Image: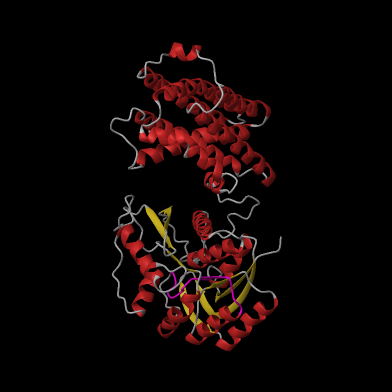
């Protein structure tokens, strides 16, 4: 494959934490080739900006032309701009060279509070550059400044609804999409404005493309090492767009990249230090702690996962319209499967190489034991006894699924067995959580609602957490080729889950 090219037009940070220096690290970490056009030189450190030398606009033009006439660019990322004349030159170049994607980070104020863009240039940026932009990435103060320049004086947003409204207002300035960064307005757990650090729980970035609002939530992190987060986020988006990701996936990956960069940062200097741009400089395509999110976002997993979690059987549970006799047959087979599910986790405990993994798998077996007790009580409410269920033959779907998992456990390693077990463990929890939180799910008079409640109960939620943590920990240790083998196991196990639902509807052979 040919390397993807990103031209970065921005200022230089002498401390290395932001600007062109950060941009190039981010692009390198994503496997992209970085070209640069320097708009300004800064004398700065972690405590703040001490001075700025503005590169003459005509020289900026020469840098841009030299890169685009020879190497070209798949995406242009724009950061600090020093003058109105420079903005005019960049706008003309974007039109002349027909750049397919433009990421504009309207750098106006540094993290330390220093003014980086002259006020006279703000109007030119708004009028000439934003309409050429694929995605604009302001923080809240920058968004308010842009709107004020256009004649709209907006108050500080209140809570999530206020931030979404502000994102829509900014989109009206002419960019195709806007990512309004929420770091300046941390929110509480219920997404209201946090008035102090103790209340702060979430940070929400808002992507708006004129039709759809997409929220990207991260935990509120207490860290002084946030220098260059805006530059890094915009460059990560540019890299992801260059690599062919759609806008939503490009932004999601970039948000996770920066989140991990803050979590794994190290302190440099006496003030606001840089994030860690190289946290994912390895051969695996997901950041630490994000394997489950990664696998469910893969194009080869998404369709089969959707068929599993949005199956007709699941919809029947939510509406209460599932035929009773079919559901009773499903309950019997589900009980028989739970026995094998416990055996599989016991096998995982046996195959563990250290006490931590042995104990974790053993704990999951205990969770399944308690879940089975709840299952027996639930079956009894339908007039089905334990003795009846144990005398019922397994269907082909039940036998195929349970034996597949046991076979993986016998013939492969501990991690492969964890991956084979994951669709059931994670999927049932995800399905139940979605149905439980969905206003359209019938509760009163729905005899299947108890099934949903069982899988959102604290005990099962804890089992999902344990199983997910095991996956996240050990998937970091595999090679790319091994990861692909394991994902095939995950897909096959998910397909067998679909067959189990089909059996519940009477669509599979017994």
**Quadrant of the frame with the C terminus:** top right
Q: Is residue 376 above or below residue 100?
A: above
Q: Residue at x 53, y 44 (%)?
A: 292
Over which residues does the magenta segment extend?
Answer: 97-111
Seen at 46% across and 20% down, the residue is 332
Quadrant (top left, top right, bottom left, bottom right) of the N terminus: bottom right
How are the residues colored? secondary structure
Q: Is residue 98 magenta?
A: yes
Q: Is residue 104 magenta?
A: yes
Left or right: residue 193 compared with residue 466: left
Quick check: 131 left or right of 489?
left
Q: Is residue 457 above or below residue 299?
A: above
Predominant SS of the magenta segment: loop
Q: Position of residue 43 (x, y in %)?
A: 52, 78
Q: Quadrant of residue 296?
A: top right
Residue 249 in the image: x percent, y percent? Answer: 52, 56
Residue 472 pos. (x, y %) = 55, 42
* Percent coordinates x, y for residue 144 in the rendering: 35, 72
Q: Nearer the viewer, residue 98 or 105?
A: 98
Question: Which one is nearer the viewer's eye here, 182 or 431?
Answer: 431
Residue closest to the eye, 90 or 221: 90
């Amino acid at each position: 494959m040919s390397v993807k090219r990103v031209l970065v037009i921005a200022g230089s940070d002498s401390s290395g934490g932001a600007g062109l220096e950060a941009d190039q690290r981010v692009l390198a970490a994503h496997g992209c080739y970085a070209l640069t056009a320097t708009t300004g030189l800064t004398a700065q450190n972690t405590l703040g900006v001490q001075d700025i030398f503005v590169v003459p606009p005509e020289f900026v033009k020469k840098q841009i032309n030299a890169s685009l006439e020879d190497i070209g660019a798949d995406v242009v990322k724009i950061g600090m701009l020093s003058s109105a004349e420079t903005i005019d030159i960049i706008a003309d170049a974007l039109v002349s060279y027909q750049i397919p994607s433009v990421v504009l980070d309207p750098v106006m104020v540094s993290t330390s509070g220093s003014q980086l863009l002259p006020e006279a240039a703000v109007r030119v940026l708004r009028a000439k550059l934003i309409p050429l932009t694929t995605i604009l990435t302001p923080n809240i103060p920058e968004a308010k400044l842009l709107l004020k320049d256009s004649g709209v004086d907006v108050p500080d947003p209140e809570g999530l609804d206020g931030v979404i409204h502000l994102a829509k207002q900014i989109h009206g300035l002419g960019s195709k999409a806007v990512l309004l960064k929420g770091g300046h307005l941390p929110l509480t757990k219920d997404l209201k404005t946090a008035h102090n650090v103790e209340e702060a729980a979430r940070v929400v970035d808002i992507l708006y493309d004129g039709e759809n609002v997409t929220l990207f939530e991260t935990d509120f992190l207490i860290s002084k090492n946030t220098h260059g987060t805006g530059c890094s986020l915009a460059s990560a988006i540019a890299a992801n767009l260059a690599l062919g990701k759609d806008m939503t996936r490009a932004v999601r990956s970039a948000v996770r990249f920066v989140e991990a960069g803050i979590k794994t940062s190290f302190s440099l200097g006496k003030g606001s230090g840089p994030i860690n741009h190289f946290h994912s400089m390895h051969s695996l395509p997901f950041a630490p702690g994000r394997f489950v999110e990664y696998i469910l976002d893969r194009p080869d997993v998404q369709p089969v996962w959707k068929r599993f979690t949005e199956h007709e059987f699941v919809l029947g549970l939510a509406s209460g319209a599932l035929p009773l006799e079919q559901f009773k047959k499903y309950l019997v087979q589900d009980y028989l499967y739970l026995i094998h599910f416990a055996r599989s986790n016991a096998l995982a405990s046996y195959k563990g190489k250290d006490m931590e993994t042995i104990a974790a798998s053993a704990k999951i077996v205990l969770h399944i034991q308690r879940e089975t007790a709840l299952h027996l009580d639930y079956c009894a409410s339908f007039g089905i006894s334990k003795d009846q269920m144990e005398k019922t033959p397994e269907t082909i779907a039940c036998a195929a699924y349970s034996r597949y998992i046991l076979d993986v456990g016998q013939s492969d390693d501990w991690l492969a067995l964890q991956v084979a077990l994951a669709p059931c463990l994670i999927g049932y929890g995800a399905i139940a959580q979605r149905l439980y939180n969905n206003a359209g799910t019938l509760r009163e008079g729905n005899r299947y609602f108890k099934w949903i409640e069982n899988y959102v109960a604290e005990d099962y939620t804890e089992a999902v957490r344990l199983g997910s943590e095991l996956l996240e920990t050990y998937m970091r240790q595999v090679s790319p080729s091994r990861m692909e083998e394991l994902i095939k196991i995950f897909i096959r196990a998910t397909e067998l889950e679909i067959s189990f639902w089909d059996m519940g509807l009477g669509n599979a052979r017994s």
